[in-house]
Image: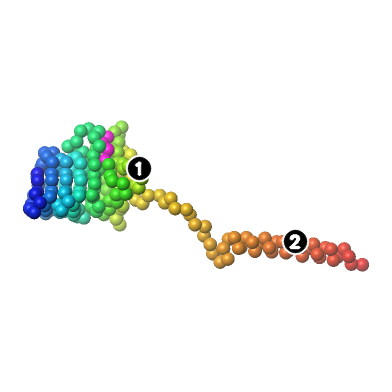
Amino acid sequence: MEIPAGSEGSLGGGSQDLGCESVTIAGTYSLDGGSLQNAGAFLIEAGGVLDAQGSIQLGSDFRNQGSLNAAASAMVFDGSCAAPGASITVTGVTTVANLTLSSSSGQSFVLPNGANIVVTGSLVLQGQPGQPLQITTAAGQPATFTLGPGAQVTQQNVNLVNVYVGPPPSTAPVAVPVSGLGWTASLALLLSLLSWGALRSARIRSFLRTQP
């Protein structure tokens, strides 16, 4: 399936099974609320536009170098068009309503370093017992699934490598809370008071011993 540069296409709200054929979008294509199923290797070229409002099932790599509108979409990545255990690349997905990454054969989904995928509806990460789904990115800045208000997560048999659901743990140094004079000044004042009290007691005892 190919949408050449300068052309437009539409699913018209219908349903189409691609049988794992590859898809290249260099022009503009719209699902119009329809359903695109069993898409093979999927490429949105620079300048290409996919309006994915509807549902789309992707069985292989997904590379977005153009524009993707998935804010009201259901996107399912299941590796069904790739070899069992294959590594599948997913790039250029930023905001999606409902997102599923699943595998029945221990496949690995690779996200770009620093990717931030915002999910506003439901996020499903599903592997199988003994064959967990792998979601990974290269070492360095982690990839993140950011959850919108009210978003729901289902996560079973999944290994996340340098990938986080929700914000990554902070590595910034923790500041010591300071109030009033600050804990250092307060400690110094306390030690000064104790020292003054001890000196005063010693002087009183010395004065009493020198009295007739």
Using residue 184 as the reference point, say whether residue 128 is left or right of it: left
Judged from the image, the secondary structure of the residue bearing numbered disc 2 is helix
**To which residue does mark 2 refer?**
198
Residue at image coords 11%, 39%: 21
Residue 107 in the magenta stretch? The answer is yes
The numbered mark at residue 44 is none
**Amino acid identity at mark 1:** Ala
Can see residue 132? yes
Residue at image coords 65%, 64%: 189
Residue 66: image location, x then y, percent: 18, 52
Residue at image coords 24%, 44%: 90
* Magenta highlight range: 105-109
* Residue situated in front as seen by the camera: 158 or 92: 92
| Distance (Cα) linking label 1 and label 2 | 59 Å
Residue 122: image location, x then y, percent: 26, 50
Q: Which of marks 1 and 2 is nearer the N terminus?
A: 1
Q: How is the protein colored in the picture?
A: rainbow
Q: Where is 122 relative to 133, above or below?
A: below
Residue 47: image location, x then y, percent: 15, 53
Q: How crowded is mark 2: few (under 14 residues within 10 Å), some or many (20 or more)?
A: few
Q: Where is 210 relative to 174, above or below?
A: below
**To which residue does mark 1 refer?**
139
Instruction: Choose mark 1 or mark 2, whichever is in front.
Output: 1
Residue 149 in the magenta stretch? The answer is no
Image quadrant in which the C terminus is located: bottom right
Q: How crowded is mark 1: few (under 14 residues within 10 Å), some or many (20 or more)?
A: few
Residue 94: image location, x then y, percent: 25, 52
**Amino acid identity at mark 2:** Ala
Q: Are marks 1 and 2 in contact (CB under 8 Å)?
A: no
Residue at image coords 35%, 42%: 139
Using residue 160 as the reference point, say whether residue 187 is left or right of it: right
Using residue 121 as the reference point, say whether residue 211 is left or right of it: right
